[in-house]
Image (cartoon, coloured by chain):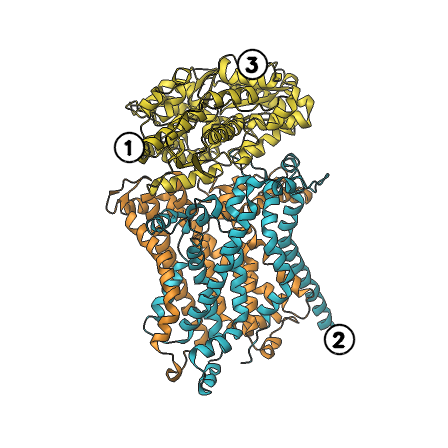
Chain colours: A orange, B cyan, C yellow
Amino acid sequence: MHMLNAIRPKNRTIIAYLAIPVVMFVFTVFVPLVTALVYSFFEWKGGPVKTFNGLSNYIQLFQDGTFWEAFGHNIYLVIACIIGQVGIAFVLVMMVNSKLVFCKTIHRTFGFFPSTIAAVCIGLIWNMIYHNKYGILNWFLEAIGRKDLCQVWLNNSDIVMLLVTIPLIWQYIGYYMVIILSAIASISTDIFESSEIDGANGFQKAVYITLPLIKNTMLVCITLCIAGNMKAFDNIYVMTKGGPGTSSMVMAMYGYQVSFGQSNMGYGSCISVGIFVLSLLVIGGSQMLINYVTREKEAA
Amino acid sequence: MKNNGTHKLKKGFLGVFMNLILWIFSLSCIFPIIWMFYSSLKEKRVFNADIIGLPSEPTLLNYTRILSNPDYHLGASIWNSARTTLLSIAMIVAFSFIVGYILSRVRFKLNRVLYVMFLMGMLIPIHSLLVPIYIVFQKCGISNQWFTLLLPYVSFGLPMGIFLVEGFVKTVPVDLEEAAAIDGSSFSHTLWTIIFPICRPILVTVAIIQVFSCWNEFSFALVLLKDVGLQTVPLALTQFKGQFASDYPKQMAAMLITMAPILVLYFAFSKQIINGMVAGAVKG
Amino acid sequence: MNKRQALSAVLATAMVASLGVTASAATPVAATELAYTGELELMHYSTLEESQGNGGSDGFRTVLAAWQEAHPDITLNENVLANAEYKTQIQTLASANDLPDVFLLQGMNTKAWAEQGLIMDLTDTIAASPYYADYNQAYFTPFKTADGKIYGYPVLTGGTCTVVIYDKAMWKDAGFDAFPATWADVETAAAYFGEQGIDTIAFGNGGQWQANSDFLSTLGNRYTGPEWFQSLIDKAGAKFTDEAFVKALTEMQRLFTQTTIFNEDFNAVTNEDAREYYISGDAAAFIGGNWDWSYIYATLKESDPDKFANMGIAVLPQPADADKAPNSQNIGLGYAVAFNSNLAEDPDKLAAAIDLAQEITGPAFASYVAENYALGGLTKVADVDLSAFDQQTVDFYNWSYVDTETCEIYDSYINSAVWSILNTDMQSMMNGELDPATVAANAQAAYEENY
């Protein structure tokens, strides 16, 4: 899709346009990252004194059970949220665009709200839903006669990850809805109308006609979703502080806890670098996987 | 026409089903705001005793306490937030558009390098990088200035914008630019008069998403600013927190007061915003 | 995450008003002549919100304002943040070697920051203070290093971190005239309360710091006695893996996993949620810190006079296999006014900072909080007149400062790395998912590595 060489702008023009954003971005994002990389080779307990200790932070990182447990939780989040956030958002957008649905503007406007609200409020609301005495969930289970299922939800280390993922999914569906909505706007209306959900096989049409047309945007959504969930922090912090124990600990929270809670800036920097590298690997891996899968499909 | 009848029936069910699902979802999304609103009409003790119920004796006490107390400096912080947010959004939208378009369309050596570099920007775990960022800003003497926050807000907002624009531009047929070039339009002219309007839906989307994240951003504001006079809204809101007890209804009242400007804008212009987002269809 | 420190006793201002005691004007600060003119940076966490429910914060702000008025040539450059944010920012500033002139130092940071030369040695300055004779020397301990140097003026007010608050009427119905002195009796009561469908004791450890500050710190002392912890602070041989401490952890696990004493969601709710169980009558007692007492006091006084009249306080019950200090509770001052070591370069500015530190922790502050809130700080005040306060306040004052034996608040000492690891593990232990020996071993490993 690159433009013809004949109308390609001069290098000078490209440089002039890119200079400011690129310089700004490199200064703000990469200089601190490189600084952190340097610090990660030091023992640094949060003061002016730093002692070079070679790779020992990294050796510790490789052996740190909590960090790898947290990494596992991030992978869980990524998978759950790609299906939950991007997947559900796509389905809801298809529904909103259907002729059978009324009040489209309301649905388009409201869905985005949860992602605008501070994490502390979201956390409070969901804590109330899960609360074992006053919570809606236990109240509902009791109402349908399944009191045996009632429990202290957020204290169950087996399912706590699922329980903190649900609010995260709910909160960001609207975010991806907005992105997908605008992508669909770029599709020709004729094509789109033929893919509307108006009957039994509407969803098939949506999947076979619309999805390929907005493939690029969906890939961007998936990338955003992976990136966002590899560094997830706020919501889980408000709801469980990573507990019980480390059952809902995620990498960014662990890095924060080590840096600020334990004043261990050197190891904290090492964790940041670790998060960055792992995220890169996961994103790279997912891109390769997606390319592989879609190539298969196109060939078939 | 039996077949048609069942078809209609099925269609009816599907319609009801879809409307129901969407309403449940939409209501669940708007509920937090409603809950914050009626909770802000409660006193702390009433709220703590029953956090989900409606207030039996609604009171505006929380609002009057906040608005009548100059120590909370909400006015100054709203101004700081508004300035920072506005400038950040303008820059994010402009830069995302330029960079996203160039990366999508123009072939040059560093194209993929830049693409990957911006992609990396989304992977930075800012919570554990706060100290290095502070040290870099401090050494360069640019912490604690009115413009300090623009740098991280724009830089960390850019990757998402660039990706959305890049993905969007790929769906726009390249013939447009070619036709314009044949008509003698320069690169810049085509960029701003032809491509920019076409990209409006995605740019509105970028702006919407970023407005709220800039307005609510907390970590950078906490670490990079020391001067009380420069504090943004989320930082000013911490003045409502105690060490061992939080007055949630009061915090909610404060949040609603400070979110009011953008909430009102969002509602007032939701139609235009949505139209901006959805109505940019290009014939392929 | 950082545990909150125990620190400031909290009494609702509502109480002062309702008692008809008008908050008296601050005792004027000593107007020492100061040569310095210009800016003085000060960072603290006594926000306006904090001061409205908290005697220590109110006193701090009041004396600060009086000091500013007495020294118009000095511009106080205040940076006030809520406690949690304060801790994040001060940590960042320390890491960048960019601390403000004057700030509040958390006890457990003393050793590390002193070693790195971030904070000024104030030993001689404190000894030369005009109020030195009246200082409560015990409060300096968290801000002392092993070589006896002191790095700060302990600030705000001292309050207990572990107090049992119980409903006298409910316990009378259960057959106890006063709160039981042993856990065995509490278990007996738990059988009774269980039949009524109420929790015996409400506790909230959702923030992970509560089990340490508001429980283990006192429970541990019952097994180990104070010498063990002192030895741990001095690195004089004591270990987390010592039998006595492991026994304390074992008892703690037993209480939370094998008895029905506590609310089943103790690990998922915060102390703020748990005390509501007590207030609403869903629990017969509650364990928390002085800030919880203040909240319960103020709430019941306004909403439930009967329950208010039945409000009793007690020390943590004694475990059957513990043999030390049954009447102990942990109390102290967790923060001290400390100076950036660069301040030494400007003697006039330093003199101003010293004057500020001495006034803000001195008699002006002490008499203000004593008269208005029945609280005490670093400087002792002779003959506190408690006649204007109600019985509950007087009882709590005597219980806190006079009638009980005191012990240390664990997380005012050592360092945050150890407590962060111990607190996380302890939460799993209280769910029965980790055994006490492992918890102790992990804490010991963190201690050896970081301290």
Q: Secondary structure at mark 2?
A: helix
Q: Position of residue B181 (x, y in %)?
A: 44, 84
Q: Are marks 2 and 1 on the same chain?
A: no
Q: Are marks 1 and 3 on the same chain?
A: yes
- Marks 1 and 3, the one that precedes in the sequence: 1
Q: Are marks 3 and 2 on the same chain?
A: no
> Splitting the image into 4 quarters, where does residue C154 fall?
top left
Q: Is residue A150 visible?
A: no
Instruction: Calculate the distance from the C-alpha at mark 3 to the C-alpha at mark 2.
Output: 94 Å
Give the label on residue C166, or none. Answer: none
Q: Nearer the viewer, residue B267 or A258?
A: B267
Q: Are marks 1 and 3 in contact (CB under 8 Å)?
A: no
Q: Amino acid at mark 1?
A: Glu
Instruction: Calculate the distance from the C-alpha at mark 1 to the C-alpha at mark 3.
Output: 43 Å
Give the label on residue C115, or none. Answer: 1
Determine whether, in the image, residue A30 is placed left or right of residue C267. left
Q: Which residue is mark 3?
A: C385
Chain holding disc 2? B
The structure residue drawn at horizontal position 50% and vertical position 42%, both measured from the top left corner, is: A240
Determine whether, in the image, residue C274 is placed left or right of residue C160. right
Q: Amino acid at mark 2?
A: Lys
